[in-house]
Structures are given as C-alpha cells and as structure tokens.
Image: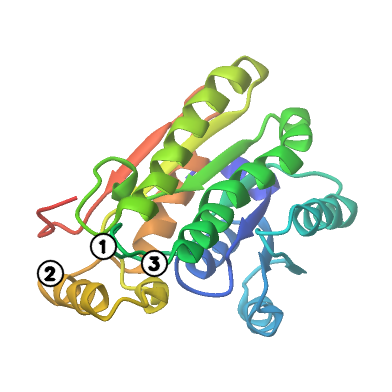
Amino acid sequence: MSSDLHVKVALVTGASSGIGRATALALSRAGATVAVGARRVDRLKELVESAPGEMLAVHLDVTDEQSITDAVAAVVEKFGRLDALVNNAGLMQSGMIVGADTREWVRMVETNLLGSMFAVHAALPHLISSKGAVVQVSSTAGRTASLGSGAYAATKFGITAFSESLRQEVTALGVRVIVIQPGFVATELTDHITDPVMRAAAAEIGQSMRPLAPQDVAEAVVYALSQPAHISVNEILVRPTDQVRS
C-alpha cells in the first residue's frame, strides 16, 4: 500500500452503513483523513468515535444539491484540501416496469445518478487542485440489466457513462476516475425493495451464495486509491466467486 494515502483527505458519501461505513474505516486504517457524509448523523457520530484516525462527520443528503455543496465546503474548510471523493450513496428498489410506482424511479435517479453527478460537480475544483480521484461505487447492474432491475440498472449504466466521459475530461489534469462494480453484497440495500416478490427473490439469491461483505468492496477502493499517481485503475469488477448471473 502506497504511503501517499497518508496525506489524502477523502469524503465518503452514504457512510452511515454498509459499503460506505466499511470504506471509511478502511481508508482511516490506511492512514487517510476521512470525512463521512450521510443523512443519519447519529450513526456517523458512532462511526467517528470508532475510527482509528481523524474523521469528520458532515450531514449530507445527496438528493439535495445544496447539501452536497455545503458538505464539500465544510470538508475543505476543515482540512484545507480534498483528495478523493467516494460516491457510495445509493438506493435499490427493484421491481417490474409494468405497473411500477414511478416515484421509486425518481428516488433512485435522484439518489444514485443525480446525487453522484452533483457530488462530482461540487468536489471537482478541489480534486483538480490536488490531482485527486473520484471513486464511483456502482454495481454489476451497471454492466448487465436483468429482469426486475430496469430502473436501478438505468441509474448504474448512467454512472458508468458519466464516469467515462468525466475520465476523458479530467485525466489530462491528473484526476483519476475509478468505477467499482460489486456483485451481490450483504448490506441493507435490499431492505429498500418494496415489491414483495422482488424482495423474496433478492433474499433467495443471497442465500444461494456466499455474498461479498462490505469490507471486501472497501478493500477494492483502498487498492485503487493506493496506486502511484501514474496508474489509474479505472474499473474494478468484483463478484462473489459463486455468483453466476450479473
């Protein structure tokens, strides 16, 4: 692991649970100064108390562009710089397209896609200054759409497209763009599924394999950020060994 990580300041969104929480702790253990953002500030306070290194909690609602702007400003004001943005906040509400509650589509687009885009927009001037990195925690659903995942996959495909366009724009400025695409991970993400059939299907899929733990994905993030400046790991696809589809 590169010692360069010891001078980095990272902001992790969606850090109150799951992959975000695990990533914040992994970065802290690796020597980074970490800011953690989420709506559930009470959980962030517990996370800060358990961190091995310096950590700052900021209220952050990725569906609110001003909230994102304020959070990024608070991090830079506190630490004087920002070296890495880890866009992790996400929502999965699987369901069929026919008869769908389109309000769920709106929530996923606002959280998964627009939230990620707004965070990049707010952080980018600072990342250009520090020659930092954007890490997009996406999904295998950003590579392969499946039955019942149409709207969710659309947001993740959108992240993939946005990230590649971003990479081409900022790579000459020294900013690295990294997309992490996990397969099935044991998190509370599936708790957001309101369709009982899809929720049962997700549970069955999880029981059919040994899923990834949030820490497994966190280590992929640390690996990518630990590479020397001249190496850009643009994409990491990580699945459970016994996952067949997606």
Name the residue type under label 2.
Met
Name the image quarter holding residue 240: bottom left
| Relative image position of residue 146 (x, y in whole percent) | 21, 51
Position of residue 244 relative to residue 123, above or below, is below
- At horizontal 36% and vertical 74% (from top left) the residue drawn is 193
Horizontal placement of 31 versus 246: left or right?
A: right
Contact flag, marks 2 and 3 (Cβ < 8 Å)? no
Eye-nearest disc, 1 or 3: 3
For disc 1, the neighbor class at 10 Å (few under 14, some 14 to 19, many from 20) is many
Residues 29 and 77: in front is 77
Instruction: Work out whether mark 1 precedes mark 2 in sequence or the reverse, and give the earlier one.
Output: 1
Identify the disc placed on residue 93: 3
Q: CA distance from mark 2 to mark 3?
A: 21 Å
Eye-nearest disc, 2 or 3: 3
Name the residue type under label 1.
Phe
**Can you see residue 88?**
no
**Can you see residue 240?**
yes
Position of residue 246 relative to residue 171, above or below, is below
Residues 5 and 158: in front is 158
Give the residue number, with chain letter if any, for mark 1: 184
Position of residue 102 relative to residue 170, above or below, is below
